[in-house]
Image (cartoon, rainbow, N blue to C red):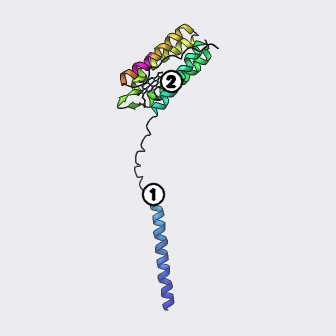
């Protein structure tokens, strides 16, 4: 008698425990969506993009020096992509709207350069290229970036 009572109590306890576990699992499934913390956006790597842009500027300049329009188109395309990234990300640097400034200052001369490259006009492409460089420096000076002025690539040393 006593034993069957213990068995009964145990089975009730077991039922309760499994029921509670079941409920809990249901609750886990149906838990109201918790508003996730906004993940902190990693800062846009502007310095890195600028360094890439600088290398591309020299490569593009070299391609123009050598009259290689296809190569110039390729480097222009790369610069265009980085520039667009900076604009789309709305990059801020020390609270200055670099993304927006880039759309006003750098994208127009780059578009002009693209047009002249597409026309195959080497002379005008070179003029546009100098305008692009001017835009780099106008922004740097305006924002107060301490960096040597951006220049076209130095002429190749003859062997
Ligand atoms: C609208 C503004 C703007 C324009 C246009 C711009 N830059 Fe910059 N540039 C910056 C800012 C801001 C920094 C500083 C970034 C930092 O240190 O985080 C910078 C830094 C740099 C640096 C230094 C990176 C380093 O490693 O310290 C180079 C090189 C550079 N820019 C090249 C260029 C070239 C080349 C162009 C044009 C094709 C250009 N930039 C156009 C705003 C601009």
Q: Position of residue 133 (x, y in %)?
A: 47, 17
Residue range (magenta): 134-139
Picture quadrant where residue 119 is located = top right
**Residue 8 in view of the camera:** yes
Q: Position of residue 37 (x, y in %)?
A: 40, 48
Mark 2 C-beta to ligand 1 under 8 Å:
yes
Residue at x 51% of width, y 16% of height: 152
Mark 1, residue position = 30
Q: Residue furthest left?
A: 95
Q: Position of residue 141 (x, y in %)?
A: 38, 21
Q: Position of residue 5 (x, y in %)?
A: 48, 87
Any magenta on residue 137? yes
Residue at x 51% of width, y 25% of height: 53
Against 89, residue 111 (above or below) is: above
Of 81 and 43, which appears nearest the observer? 43
Of 108 and 32, which appears nearest the observer? 108
Picture quadrant where residue 156 is located = top right
Against 154, residue 48 (above or below) is: below
Q: Quadrant of ligand 1?
A: top left
Secondary structure under tag 1 reads helix
Any magenta on residue 114? no
Mark 2, residue position = 54
Q: Are marks 2 and 1 in contact (CB under 8 Å)?
A: no
């Amino acid at each position: 008698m006593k034993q069957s009572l213990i068995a009964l109590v145990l089975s009730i306890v077991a039922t309760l425990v499994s029921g509670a576990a079941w409920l809990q699992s249901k609750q886990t499934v149906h838990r109201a969506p918790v508003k996730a913390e906004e993940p902190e956006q990693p800062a846009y790597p502007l310095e890195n993009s600028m360094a890439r842009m600088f290398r591309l500027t020299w490569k593009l300049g070299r391609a123009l020096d050598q009259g290689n329009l296809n190569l110039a188109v390729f480097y222009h395309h790369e610069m265009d992509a980085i520039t667009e990234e900076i604009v789309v990300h709305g990059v801020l640097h020390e609270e200055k709207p670099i993304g927006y400034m880039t759309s006003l200052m750098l994208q127009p001369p780059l578009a002009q350069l693209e047009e002249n490259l597409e026309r195959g006009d080497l002379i005008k492409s070179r003029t546009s290229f100098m305008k692009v460089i001017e835009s780099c420096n106008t922004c740097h000076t305006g924002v107060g970036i301490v960096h040597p002025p951006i220049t076209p690539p130095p002429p190749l040393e003859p062997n």
